[in-house]
Image: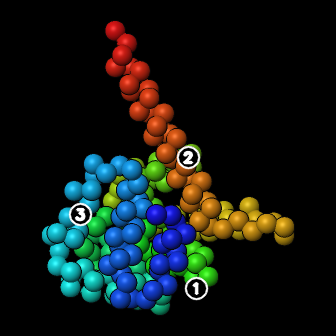
Amino acid sequence: MTRSDLLTAANGGPDDVGRLLVGSYAWGTGDRAFLVGRRAQVFTKNTTESTTAKLVKALTVLRDQGPAKAYEMLALGGEQKLPYLGPSFYTKLLYFADARPDAQPGRALILDQFVAIALKEVEHWDITERGPWGPDQYQRWLEFAHNHARTESTNQAAVRPHAIEAAMFRKGWAIYQARIAAARAARRQP
C-alpha cells in the first residue's frame, strides 16, 4: 500500500471512512506488524457506528473549517475523540481524507513520533516525541511546513508542504535509528 493508493482512495466519500482508517493504519504500520494488536483496539473497543459517526463529523469539519479544527475535535478532550486512536494515526487519516480530486495532498499533514523527533532535534521545538500533541502544536506544525514550503519554492519548482513533512519524517527516523544503534553499541561494551 502506497501513499498514492490512499490519496486516490480518499476520493471515495464519507462512506469509505472506515476503509480509509484501516488503510491509514496499514500504511502507517508498514512492516512493524508487532504493533497491530495494539492498533486494532480502535476497532475492537469502539463500535463501528460510533467510530464512523465520529470520524465523519471530524472529516466534515476538516472540509469546512480546516485541518487544525478537525485535529482539535479528535484530540484528547475533543468532541470526536475516539479511544485508542492517537494523533500519529488520526493525522494520517486527516492527511489522506484531505486529498484533492487529482489525488494530491491538501492542507492536512501527518504529525507522528518521527516528525516530532525532527522538530525537537533539528528545529529545537519544545515538543514531546511520543505525543500526545495539543491542537496548538499541530497548528504550529502546519504553519511551519506550509511556510517552509513557500520559502523553498521557486518559479521553476514548487515545494509542497507534504514534501516538508516527508523530509522531517525521514530526518526523525534517521535520528531514531542512530539512537537505537548507539544504545546497542553501548550495551555491547564491557
Name which residue type carries label 1: Pro
Where disc 2 sits, the SS reads helix
Tell me which residue sits at (27%, 83%) in the image: 52
Q: Position of residue 83 (x, y in %)?
A: 21, 69
- Rendered location of residue 112, percent (x, y): 42, 57
- Residue 33 lies, with reference to residue 164, above or below; the image says above
Q: CA distance from mark 2 to mark 1?
A: 30 Å
**Amino acid type assigned to the residue bearing label 3 in the image:** Ala
Question: Can you say which quadrant of the picture contains the C terminus?
Answer: top left
* Residue at the (17%, 74%) spot, across then down: 46
Q: Which mark is residue 40?
A: 3
Mark 2, mark 1: which one is toward the viewer? Answer: 1
Q: Which residue is tagged 2?
A: 171
Marked residue nearer the N-terminal end (3 or 2):
3
Q: Say what secondary structure mark 1 lies in.
A: loop
Q: Nearer the viewer, mark 3 or mark 2?
A: 3
- Judging from the image, the colouring scheme is rainbow
- Left of 49 or right of it: where is 165? right
Q: Which residue is mark 1?
A: 101
Task: Confirm whether residue 76 shows in the render.
Answer: yes
- Answer yes or no: is residue 95 visible: no
Residue lying at 56% horizontally and 46% vertically, measured from the top left: 171
**Amino acid at pointer 2:** Lys
Where is residue 149 shown, x and y percent of the image?
Answer: 68, 65
* Local secondary structure at mark 3: loop
The residue carrying pointer 1 sits among few (fewer than 14), some (14 to 19) or many (20 or more) residues within 10 Å by Cα, namely few
Task: Find the distance from the CA under tag 3 to the CA under tag 2.
Answer: 28 Å
